[in-house]
Structure formats: structure tokens, C-alpha cells
Amino acid sequence: MTRKILFLCLLVFALPVNASTINIFACEPEWAALAEEIGGQKISLFTATTAFQDPHHIEARPSLLAKARNSDLLFCTGADLEAGWLPILLRKSGNGRIQSGETGHLMAADHVDLLEARQKVDRSMGDVHARGNPHIHLDPRNIVPIADELTKRLMQIDPANESYYESRLSDFSKRWKKALVKWEKQSAAIRRMPIVVHHRSWVYLENWLALREVATLEPKPGVPPTSKHLANVVSTLKNEPARAVIRSPYQDTRASQWLEKQTGITAILLPYTVGGTEAAKDLFTLFDDTISRLQKAIN
Amino acid sequence: MNLSKSFAVCAAAMASAFGYDAALAETKLEPSLIIDLRAASYSQDPEEYSLPGFQLGGEGGLSDEGLSLGHTEFSMSGIFADKIEGKFTAVIHHHMNEVEADMEELWFQTIGLGNGLTFKGGRFFSDIGYLNNKHPHMWDFADEPLVYRAMLGGQYNDDGLQASWIAPTETYWRIGVEAFKGAQYPFTSIGNHNLDTYTIFTKIGGDIDESQSWQLGLSYLQGDSLLRQSGHDHEHEDEHADEDHAGEEHEPAFSGDSEIIGLDFVYKWAPGGNPRNRSFVFQMEYFHQRENGRVDMLHEDVVEESTSYKGRQNGAYLQGVYKFHPHWKAGLRYDRLFSDNSGDADILEEAGLASDYDPYRASAMLAWLPNEYTTLRFQYNYDKSRPETDHQFLVQFVYSFGAHGAHQF
């Protein structure tokens, strides 16, 4: 009897071991895209959110728990972007590999400098994160150290394929450096372009391309636009006109379209992440499309 | 802060037992406070509330008429050395026009043990059913479903141990077992407490597409009772009974074994996977209870009459809640209970366990959620718990301080 039970236990615990590929749980599409660049054929990938989902407000659904339980590497933004759901997944998954401090716990924000870090955070400020603004992937220069760290982790988790990951990283880095030069050239015309944004999810893009954020549609981060605040935005724009009103695919279109009607400033959708527009198929085309949409708005 | 100190000491003991002596240096306790204020108006006397065919126990019953303190909670939680999570919750609430304080939770749980395994110990809410382990401020209605009131005394929490396992499958599948002391309703604080009350539960769930998800649960609960009476503090109730009725009242008490089988199902729809903007949640639970033993009629703690008793009870509710705007939710709920109890007809009649009436209730609610921390809820119940119609109006205000709100499924 005992032997039978032992055998059953062994059988059950042997099931999750899938030697052929590394299971990666990516919280957002941009990290899934990066994991694909470095991991190639050696990984199997699950992306917890789409470009049309607000990563702040996801529920810890059963499907996400099942995936978290079986993953070898958790690849997320961190800096509290996923504070509403990721801690629940970690605690309930019963998976030791992806817990904080382990090799399988990779938070991209831990490997770049964050903008807008604050000494003190309270509720009157809206949905702000003490550690800084978490929308780091929109500065393509941030991708470089994150890709390095990801490669390190993959090599530790799967040492048999060390050279595979290393060569994919060096190939990716070469292409990325070239693209950075190209984007910086292309963006000459849009530098210092004044813009209105829906949510403060564009600070890294603004920082990179030296865009000027004139106003925000949300009165406070994470608080939906109010008519009173929008009226203030209209009067700000009279003194300081902007060239485009920018929103991401998961943000409500109504506020930016209303502002377009009132002021004649073009409302545009930027992909924000991979999959946000049809053209933004991977990390490279994400920035290609972002720049081309900004260029169109200025012409 | 004596409570948080003793909590930290417990945590340290646990941590060192598990070999994490350095744990406390990294420990960060997060306090949280949930304020729950409510106002209620009833067209029938709430003191006379009963559910014919069922014994009302634990915290089952109506909240006080007029303004009162609902389930106001203070809790401390923390993670020790990234390996053990602990939580302590104290509750203050109004019950029978008195303010009461209770230690509702004090538990420790392993984190990331591996292979999908998690162990928990202490005082905690059992994971049976869907609503049972959720704190009342997370519910979509201001009061519990009738079946929770009738069979679980509101919610079942007790001192015990839990082991659970998530299977390595594509579809979420969790199974767990719990062993409890059996000192809380539907069991009794008298009698032996050798962790002989147990539960088994399983949950399966997944996504249909990016907008739709579901979860199905099955649970089983089994335990014994000795002289189980209505009300969660029966000595105190007896005093009242003596004063009010000059010793004429007979209190029914159940002794025997109880088992409950439960089925729960939840379906959620959120367009594009953004539940913050718009969502619809359908939820239903069904419980079947079987009790075998005897019912004694007590008078001043002396048994005056007895009957052998076989309780066969069913209860269910279903509800739909539509979030039609980021700040507004509206919902409907329907509750129904059935019983088919057998024993001496006269004694069951006197004990309120006669099965000649099936209680039901229909509820409508509207909630305003100006931000993540605040809820203002208006609710109307067309309550037929008793044959007389009770028009119940409830207003509930919930505000939470502290830890970031968790978006649990």
C-alpha cells in the first residue's frame, strides 16, 4: 500500500518536469517579445496580458495561477505595476522557482534607473508608485540592460544551452544598436514636439525623444478624466498648443476625441506595447510604428 | 501595539522553527484597516428573525436596525524571509446591539514550497465554497446568502490545518484538505477538539477567451456537535431568555454529526480583459446538509424533552452583478432554502426545525465605487425568511486604509 502511494506521488511530481523547454511567464507583451528574441526555440512562452489590457488592473484569474505554478521564469515589469495581482499569484502558486530573490524572478524595473521616484506617496496623489514610473520599456535604451539580465537568467536556469542564448543576445544587441541609431535619426523632426497624454505612461518615450508633455487627461495618475479637469486642459492648450493627444490601446478613446473636437489637435493612438497596433509585431516594429505615427501627426 | 508585537513574536518563532533566523530583519508588517458602517431598516422585528427548518447559529442573523458598525477589521500581514506569510485579523462589530471584538484570523502559510504545495495553520476561513474565505467587505451584497446563514453561521472559520496542491495542468486545478478543531458553528465549543472536523475541496477554472473566465468548486465538510444551540454565545443568550421570558423558553440543542456538500460556480465577463471598466459576474452556490443525531429541548440547561433527529436541508443562491461604469455596479440575487427534517413533530415545531415552510429572498443592490478604497452600497431585500414579508433596506459604507487592494478572482 505505502509503496503504491509513494509511486503515485512520484508519478505526480514527475509530471511537471518538462526537460525540453523553459516555461516563461511574461506579465506584459513587451517582455514576452524580448524573451522570444533571446530564448528562441528553447522557451515556451505565456503572456499574462495583451496590449488592450491595463496591466494595473488585472484579476489573479485561475488561468494565471495555473501558468504561474508551472513556470521556470517570471518576467515582469515590477516597481508595483502588477501590485494588484502578481503578489497573489506568487503566494498561491506553490512554485518556489519564481519567488522573489530566486533566479526565476526577473523584474525588469530592477535593472534600469526609474524616473519620477518619490520620497513619499499617499492616496491624494492618485495611483503613483513610490519606486518610480514603471512604464520603462518605452525608452528603447532600457531594453539593453534588461536583455543582458534575461540572458544571464536563462543561462543559469538552462546551462546546457548557454551558448545558444549568448549568441542570440549578441545578434539581438547588434540589431538593436543599429535600430537605435536609425530611430534617433528618424526622430529629428519630432524632437521637442509638444504633446498631451492620457496617462503618464509615456515619460520614458518623452525622455528619449525629448517630447514635451503639456498636459495629462487624467487629473491624477489612474483617476479617469473629469469634465472639470478637461476644461482646464483646454485652457492650458490655448496658451501652450500641442501637436498631438496620445493614448494607448487600453485607454478610453472618449476623452482624447472630445479634446480633438474642442481644440483641433489630432488624437492619435500609439501602440504602447507589442500587439498594440497591427504594425507593432515585435520590439523593433513597436518603435518603428511609434515614430511613424508621431511623424504623421506633426506633418 | 501589543497585538502586532505578539504577532511578530509568533512570526519569529515560526521563522526560526523553519530555520530562517535572519528572517525578522527582512520582515515588514503591513497594517490594514477596513471601516464598515451600515444602516438597516426592517418592516418585521429583527429580534424575532428565524429561518424555519434551520437552526440559526454563529453570526447568522440580521445586522442591527438603525446605524451600526458592520464587520470593521484591523489586520496585520507580513511575509517572513520570503517563505512564510502570516496574517492576523481582529474584528469589531455590532451584534444584538452590543459591540463585540473577535480574533477572526491568525495564520501562517508557506510560500513557494514547490510542486504546487501550500500548507497553512492557525485560525482561518475554510476554503470551502466560493464566498466562505472572502471577507465581507469583498462581497457584492451587504449581507451573506441565506444558505451561509442557515448552514455555516455566516462563514466557517476555525482553528486548524490546511494542505493544498495545485496540479501541474494547463487548466487550473486545486485540491485541498483541512482539519479543524470543530469549535465554531456548525460545530460546538464543547466536546472533544482533536482536529476531527475535516473538509475536502477542489476548484477547477480557466479562461474561455480573453474576456471570459470561470471557476467551478466542490466541497465537503464533516464534523460532530454536542448540544449545539442557536446564537454564538449561548450562555449570554440564556441570560436574556431568562430575563425576557421568565424561564418559559425552551432552547433546542442538536447533538450528532453533520455533513455538508457544496457546489459553487463563478463566471466572469470583462470586455478585453479589463474588469475595471466594465464587467459582469454570475455566481451561484448550492449546499446540501445532512445531520443525524438528536434534538434536546433545554430549560435552564436541563433536558426536558428529546427526539431523534434527521436533518435534510438544501440551500442555494444565484446572483448577477453588472459593473456598467468604472464607478458603478448593480446586482440581483435570489436565495432559496428547503428542508425535510424528521423527528418528533411537536418537538421539531417547538425547536423551529419543522419543514412546513421554505424560506426565500430576492435582493437588488446598487453600489457606488468612487475609488479603489471606497464603496457605498444600497440594497433592498424582499425577505421571505419567515412567512411574513420583511422589507429590508440596507446601506453600507466601506473604506479601506493600508495595503494595496488585491484583485482576487
Image (spheres, coloured by chain):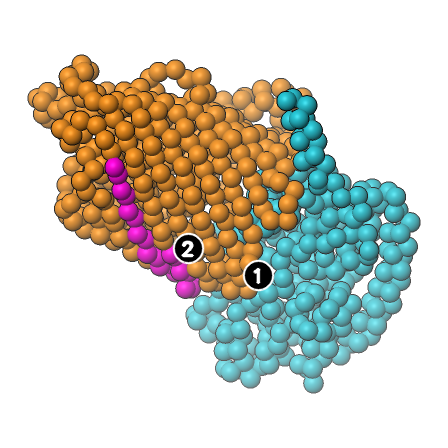
> Dot 2 surroundings within 10 Å: few (below 14), some, or many (20 or more)?
some
Nearest the viewer among A190 and B164 is B164
The spot of residue B274 in percent (x, y) is 53, 61
Please report the residue visible at 36 percent of the width from the left and 22 percent of the height from the top: B224
Evaluate whether residue B214 shows in this view.
Answer: yes
From the viewer's perspective, is B255 left or right of A151?
Answer: left
Please report the residue visible at 82 percent of the width from the left and 67 percent of the height from the top: A180
Q: Which shade is chain A? A: cyan
Q: Earlier in the sequence, mark 2 or mark 1?
A: 1
Residue type at the position of mark 1: Glu
Residue tagged 2: B282
Task: Indicate whether B63 appears above or below B238.
Answer: below
Chain ID of residue with mark 1: B
- Please tell me whether residue B116 belongs to the stretch shown in magenta: no
- Disc 2, disc 1: CB below 8 Å? no
Please report the residue visible at 15 percent of the width from the left and 17 percent of the height from the top: B304
The spot of residue B333 in percent (x, y) is 32, 53
Check if mark 2 and mark 1 are on a common chain.
yes
From the viewer's perspective, is A169 left or right of A212?
Answer: right
Nearest the viewer among A123 and B125 is B125
- Please tell me whether residue B330 belongs to the stretch shown in magenta: yes
Nearest the viewer among B225 and B131 is B225
Residue type at the position of mark 2: Phe
Chain ID of residue with mark 2: B
> Dot 1 surroundings within 10 Å: few (below 14), some, or many (20 or more)?
some
The spot of residue A211 in percent (x, y) is 69, 70
Task: Indicate whether B184 appears above or below A77.
Answer: above
* Chain painted orange: B
Nearest the viewer among A72 and B74 is A72
Residue tagged 1: B210
Which secondary structure type mostly characterizes the magenta part of the structure? strand
Residue extent of the magenta highlight: B320-340
